[in-house]
Structures are given as C-alpha cells and as structure tokens.
Image: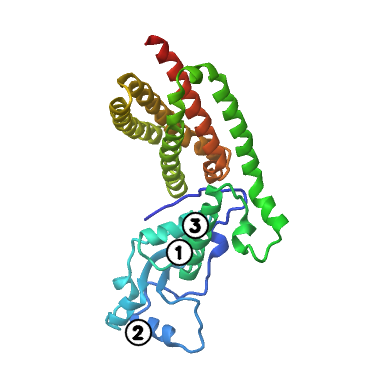
Amino acid sequence: MLHTDQFHKNSHAKCALHLVSLNVPIVHAADTIRDVKKILVDPTINFDSINYIYVLNKEKHLIGVISVKEVMKSPEDETIEQNMQKDVVYVRPHTHQERAAYVAIKNCIKEIPVVDKEGVFKGVVLSDTILKITKDELTEDMLLLEGIYSKDYADVSTISNSPWHLMKKRLPWLIVGLGGGLFAAQVIGFFETLLEQQVILVSFLPLMVYMSDAIGSQSQTIFIRYTALNNEVSFVNYLWKEVIVGTFMAAVLAVLLGIFVGLLYEPFLGTVVGTALFFAIVISVKIAILIPWFLVRLHKDPAIGSGPFATIVRDILSILIYFTISSLMYPLV
C-alpha cells in the first residue's frame, strides 16, 4: 500500500480529512456482484460519486476497492472479494491536500480514499475536489513566485478589489527588493576604482545577474515542487546532486563565455568573466536550495522565498562575486 505523510505548506494548510465525503458506495467482501448492482441502481440512494466501490471489514478497515466497470462485467454470483483490488492507493487524514491530489493524479485514479493509521476508512477525496485543489494550489504557487502571499488574493479578481487592497498584497516584497537594489548599488560603488580602470566590465554585469537568476530560479522551482510532493526527501543528498549539476552547467557556460569574450575582446577578459560566471552560478544554485529549505524548517511555505527576496539575494551575490574576482585577477595582468 502507498503510505503518504503530511507536508505543511503553511499554518493554514488544509489536510485531506477536511475534504472527504462518506457518501460513496461501501460494501463488504462477502457481498455478491448482484448485491452491489442493486445498490448502484437503487433510485433512493444518491451517492456523491460512484467511480469506485470501497470494501470494508467489520472494523471499518479499508481492505479493497473495485470500480463500477469491473462490477458491471463480473459474474453476478461471484463475491466482491473475488474481484476487488487489494493493493489500495490511499492517503492519511493529515496528508496535505496538494499531496493528496498529486497521489491521485500520479496513480491515474479519479478519487482517493483517506485511511487513518489503524486502517480505518475515513472517506474519499472526490474527483471534483481534486481538480479544485490542483487549480487553487497552482494559482497560489504562481502568486507566491512573484512575492504575493495571500489566499484571498487568488480567489478574487482585480476588478472586484479596491486598489488599496491589491497594493497591500503586492507591495511588501517589492519594498524588500527595492532595499536590496539600493544595497546592490552600494556594492557596485565599492568597486568604483576598478570600473574606472576597466569600464568594459560593466558591459557584462547584466549577463552575470541574468545567468545567476535564471539557473537559481530553475533549481529553486524544482526543489520547491519536489519538497512539496515528496516528504521523505534527503536534503543533503538533494543538495549534493544539485551542486554537481550546477557545477557542470557552470563550467560549460563559463567556458563558452570565456571563449566568446576572448575572441571578441581579449583572452584575459574572457578568463575573468568566465571565472566570475562559474562561481556566481555555483553559489546561486546553493542559495536557491538553502533558502526554501530554511523556510521548510520554519514550517513556512518555501515558495515565499522564490520571489523578489531570493532574486535580490542572488543579484547581490552575483555582483559581489563578479567584481571581487575581477579585482583579484586584474592586478595579475
């Protein structure tokens, strides 16, 4: 059986138990196919869903499941136990709703049962609920990636909200980004003498920042989704593997940039910008994993850290690395 645990996206996260329906076909293993068919066609019974029939024992433990399709094509004299699937995919009552929806979609099932640690059947998360969870979580994640942290923002349109309300939801992280941008300007100013002597270095600053942000965003987004949907992730193993991938990509991009700049300008300049790009990317990948991991440890949604905050951290570090390496290497000329 598939056993899944909880992943807390935030303190207000909904778990599977709050989403279940008990108004589904429930039978016993000894019931015949004929008995189940009578239940399904009984006009006095109005189930919320008849995608699957759930098989319980006397202790209300979930011991199997059978689809309506299987019921309709099975011999009427046979028992449910003879035709049911015993290897049931399920989630726990405290499983986060996004994880529950993911498990259902991953296993290509229309709905998913909820079972407690004693094996007692608690209900079913229905297909329409799974679709709604998927839509809501996708909308929330998209907003969080842009630094908009608000449940109610996702449920209403811009037209139905006042400008003041919309501004309050979007402005806080942008103010953080503004402060970070001012600090980045101070970092650049610290290397004023270097820039006066090597003005050409300014030309490659946007490239350094862009590549750092691009690769950092890739690593961060993949890690956030993996963490949200796989609660048993080993942080050390994941970080090590991502650093290896990031280092390899950094080496390839640094060599390509160094060759291009060396041919277009001069070989030493290509060495400088290539070296700086390599270290900027490697650090960016590490920051991209460490920020959401730290938020997970604080039981906060890791997607919060992938918006303006993480962007400005990567920008400042890439600028600092670029000019530090340049200042160290140019005196060697």
Looking at the rendered structure, the kind of residue marked 3 is Leu
Q: Which residue is denoted by mark 2 in the rendering?
A: 34
The residue lying toward the viewer, choosing from 231 and 257, is 257
Q: Quadrant of the C terminus?
A: top left
Q: Quadrant of residue 109?
A: bottom left
Q: Quadrant of residue 299?
A: top right
Left or right: residue 310 versus residue 207 is: right
Cβ atoms under marks 1 and 3 closer than 8 Å: no
User: Could you tell me which residue is drawn at 55 percent across and 48 percent down?
Assistant: 146
Left or right: residue 249 versus residue 228 is: left
Q: Which residue is denoted by mark 1 in the rendering?
A: 113
- The secondary structure type at the circle numbered 2 is helix
Looking at the rendered structure, the kind of residue marked 2 is Arg
- The secondary structure type at the circle numbered 3 is helix
User: Could you tell me which residue is drawn at 48 percent across and 89 percent down?
Assistant: 43
CA distance separating discs 1 and 3: 23 Å
Report the mark closest to the observer, 1 or 3.
Answer: 3
Say which label, 1 or 3, has the lower sequence index. Answer: 1
Mark 2, Cα crowd under 10 Å, few <14 / some 14-19 / many 20+, is: some
- The secondary structure type at the circle numbered 1 is strand
Say which label, 3 or 2, has the lower sequence index. Answer: 2
Residue 97, horizontal then vertical, whole percent: 51, 57
Q: Is residue 92 visible?
A: no
Residue 88, horizontal then vertical, whole percent: 37, 62
Residue 187, horizontal then vertical, whole percent: 56, 24
CA distance separating discs 2 and 1: 24 Å
CA distance separating discs 3 and 2: 43 Å
Q: Which residue is denoted by mark 3 in the rendering?
A: 138
**Above-or-below relation of 123 to 283:** below
**Above-or-below relation of 61 to 174:** below
The residue lying toward the viewer, choosing from 222 and 117, is 222
Q: Is residue 230 visible?
A: yes
